[in-house]
Amino acid sequence: MHSRLMAILLSVALTLAGLLALEGLSRILLTAEADLASTKPDWYQYTPELGWERRPHFTGLVGGELRQQDPARYLREFDAEGFFAIDSAQVGAATRTRVLAIGDSNTFGWGVPTRSAYPEVLDDLRADADVINLGVSGYTSMQGYATLAKYFDRVRPDVVIASFSFNDRRVVPSESATDGHEKFEREARLHRFDFREKIYLYRGLQRLLIKLHLLKSGGDGSVTVDARTAPTRVSPEQYRANLERIAQFCRERQVPLILIAFQDNPAHSEHLRTGLAHLSAGRPEQAEAELRIAINMDNWFSDLARKHLALLLEQRGAAEDAALTARLTLPAWKLAHGGRPLRLDSEYNDIVRAVAREYGAPVIEAGQTLAQDASLYLDLCHPDERGHRIVATLVNKILDGMLPPRQIAARS
């Protein structure tokens, strides 16, 4: 009797243990399946040639864009070559003048529907021209030149529009992180073969090392830099060289070039600019007060304010305070695309104007026009739909004087 009871209890225990094991295994498998499942990819893919580019055949939403209402308006659709689907038919057409727009998120149309970006608005304004938008969010002038070289023969544009600045000015931790072919190749290899976060053993071991304090908390790979000396993705000297390469490329092919100069949102950078104006006028106390306000705002221009305040403190002899003020921590996810800007838009726009004079290219001062009304911005630097229409109108006036009169179509 006793042995029979023991057998029953053992059987029940084994059954329960088996069920628990199956439950645990099921949970692991379902979790792994969800984690390893082929989720919808990002809108971009890394490439050693361009750093990153639009993902062919992508249809979906771009992360971070403003679309609280009617998200369907913000769907992005790219064709097999990475062109906007609405531009696909125009790429191979040869009946009308073709205008190629290269640039960063302001050309891509971040935060507005694809058809509301200034290249597509310009396309609607001109019945005599097809405007093809090759802007990519996050691009610098170096990536812009690489884009022009890669796609020029495919598009065969009659006019090129170029606009870069914001991403060129973003801080990176070291010279090896500045934009260049080695960096792009390194990032492409990393994102192509890095499956560590998909391996549970790696994730478990990582957590164990963190608990044992053998790995930095979070394992985030953050880097600390000095705002006074840290490089930007593209230095002013390299920025000029990149624009000259774009201009020379167009000149050699006898294709007119139009440059657009944007500016940062004046409402976001007001205290920074006021502080720098006080510095230029020899009013260090007022400058310090404004720069500290800019830092406390903790927005995209606070690190640039830290840089200038640290330099001011250094000149005053407060070396320790200067070093503390200049200390910036860059999260790992910002190491490729860069952190906040560490140089003023005006410094890079002056370079745009200088290159334009050298090569006889018109400059559209879109930033000066938009800055008259801060409500035309969505955020720190991106125009809203009204702003894009204004930019398109400014470009259209230049095209009126650039294209032969017989090609100028009547517009409402």
Image (cartoon, grey):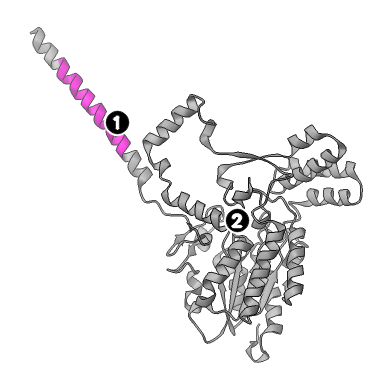
Whether residue 90 sits left or right of residue 169 in the image: it is left
Residue bearing mark 2: 179
- Other-residue count near label 1 (Cα within 10 Å), few / some / many at <14 / 14–19 / ≥20: few
Q: Amino acid at mark 2?
A: Asp
Q: In this rendering, would 321 be left or right of 177?
A: right
Residue farthest toward the top in the current orientation of the protein: 2
Position of the N terminus, as image quadrant, is top left
Q: Work out whether residue 170 or residue 110 is closer to the camera in this orientation and state it.
A: 170
Q: Residue at x 75, y 73 (%)?
A: 358
Range of magenta residues: 9-29
Quadrant hosting residue 332? top right
Q: Secondary structure at mark 1?
A: helix
Q: Position of residue 9 (x, y in %)?
A: 16, 15
| x and y percentages locating residue 226 in the rendered image | 70, 41
CB atoms of marks 1 and 2 within 8 Å = no
Estimate the spatial distance between the alpha carbons at disc 1 and disc 2, rounded to whole Å.
Answer: 47 Å
Compared to residue 199, the image places residue 51 above or below, namely below
> Sequence-wise, which precedes: disc 1 or disc 2?
1
User: Is residue 168 in sight in this rendering?
Assistant: yes
Position in image of residue 250 (x %, y %): 63, 76
**Which numbered circle lies on residue 24?**
1
- Does 173 lie within the magenta span? no
Front in this rendered view, residue 339 or 12: 339
Tell me, yes or no, whether the highlighted magenta stretch contains residue 11.
yes
Residue lying furthest right in this view? 282
